[in-house]
Amino acid sequence: MGLEASMTFVGNATTVLRLGDFTLLTDPNFITANQRVHLGYGMWTRRRTDPALSIDELPPLDAVLLSHLHGDHFDRVASRRLPRDLAIVTNPQARRGLRRRGFEAVHGLSTWETHDLVRGSQRLRVTAVPGRHGPGPVDVLLPRVMGSVVELENEGTCVLRLYVTGDTLFRPWLAEVPRRCGDIDAMLIHLGGTRRLGLLLTMDDTQGANLTELIRPRLTLPIHYDDYRAFTSPLVDFVRRTHNRGLKGITPVRRGDTLPLPLRTPKN
């Protein structure tokens, strides 16, 4: 059997990424419908949906990829149930918080730093890329956010480059992501138009379309868009707006479904 790569959408920003011989879990969030998570400063939001998988139904994991330490991205179920020696790749602020919770193998990456997993002839490289959760000075009150570029190499050749945006707002300086890392094959884009106190904290349909137009991946998989009451921007608006701009590869995925990721064809 040849090399394969896929994404299973669990819900919110939680996915299972099977990339060659590696399996990653992103932003683990396993509370069920009608339960609440804390967003800090006395703010809460309630989940509308159930995750497609429970934590007990996960496959064996090589690592967790965590964009930031918010209750809807690393919840109390993950904190209680994930193995303390499981590798977690995140940002330095989240690393400190997770270490205080007893997680022993946390790698805190500053922007543009990398962390590698190696198995035989395959290498999985995670590069931390910029993200900003809130507008202007409000951003300093929110958890630090890390976007990620995940590259799968086989025998020294990159066969897949995946961009996971994290909970960032659109900013023109995100053009640095493909400029530094190279062309993006697939993008997991965090949407939802999260609003608190009238402030936009995650990309809505317009900002999401702006980022898709800027990055121009072969495949764009929208996630993080309807699982919580704090979300205000429906997925259908993003799909319509990207269609009107003539953007290709926009592929909504239902919770529980698995989609293949586009591997590069080796050059002779």
Image (cartoon, helix red, strand yellow):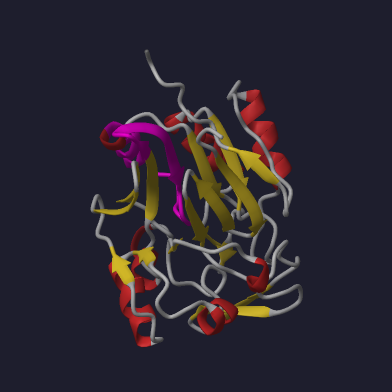
Q: Nearer the viewer, residue 239 or 63?
A: 63
Say which quadrant the C terminus sits in. Answer: top left
Q: Which residue is drawn at the image coordinates 69% and 70% (left, top)?
A: 54
* Whole-percent x, y for residue 261 in the image: 56, 36
Mark yes or no: residue 201 visible: no
Q: Nearer the viewer, residue 74 or 175?
A: 74
Mark yes or no: residue 37 visible: yes
Say which quadrant the N terminus sits in. Answer: top right
Q: Is residue 268 depicted above or below 202 in this figure?
A: above
Pick out the residue farthest to the top. 268
Q: Nearer the viewer, residue 110 or 132?
A: 110
Q: Which residue is drawn at the image coordinates 73% and 61% (left, top)?
A: 52
Is-magenta flag for residue 188? no
* Whole-percent x, y for residue 21 in the image: 47, 48
For this view, does 11 lie left or right of residue 82? right
Q: Which residue is drawn at the image coordinates 45% and 26% (left, top)?
A: 264
* Whole-percent x, y for residue 130 in the image: 33, 51
Q: Which residues are magenta?
A: 153-179
